Image (cartoon, rainbow, N blue to C red):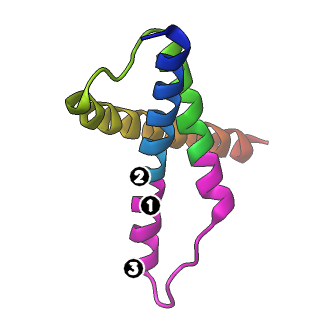
Amino acid sequence: MSEILAVVIAVLSGAGAAAVSAAVGYAKSHFGKVPPETVDWEKAGYTLALGAILGGVAGGFGITVIDAQNILVSVGLFSAVVYFTEAGVKAIVRFLRSKL
């Protein structure tokens, strides 16, 4: 598999994992409130972009999806990395804002 194709697949895997994370986050908010929360496309876009970037970085370092079984593992791992990266950045930003 060429290196460029491996990076493209990793970017798509990261974006796919982020899409799953965004959908789960939306479902959590939508079904937990009355009236239901609407889709925040900006928030979903940030999550997808973060997943694609993290996927690209993983692909650049040679962490790729090789077969169908690894796709499931990669989606789970990318989802976790996207979630914790996003939550960590939000925590840092909120901390800095509280100090300013």
Provide the residue designation for mark 2.
20
Position in image of residue 60 (x %, y %): 53, 12
Position in image of residue 44 (x %, y %): 59, 56
Q: Nearer the viewer, residue 42 or 66?
A: 66
Which residue type carries mark 3? Phe
Image: magenta residue range: 22-47
Q: Nearer the viewer, residue 97 or 35?
A: 35
State the residue lying farthest toward the right. Answer: 100
Q: Nearer the viewer, residue 7 or 26?
A: 7
| Callout 1–callout 2 Cβ contact below 8 Å | yes
Q: Residue at left 39%, top 15%?
A: 63
**How far is the residue under mark 2 from the one under mark 3?**
16 Å
Q: Is residue 45 left or right of residue 32?
A: right
Q: Is residue 10 left or right of residue 69?
A: right
**How far is the residue under mark 1 from the one under mark 2?**
5 Å
Q: Residue at left 56%, top 14%?
A: 4
Quarter of the image where the C terminus is located: top right
Q: Which numbered disc, 2 or 3, marks the residue that appears first in the sequence?
A: 2
Residue 31 numbered mark, or none: 3
Please tell me whether residue 11 is drawn above or below residue 23 in the rendered image.
Answer: above
Give the secondary structure at mark 1.
Answer: helix
Provide the residue designation for mark 1.
23
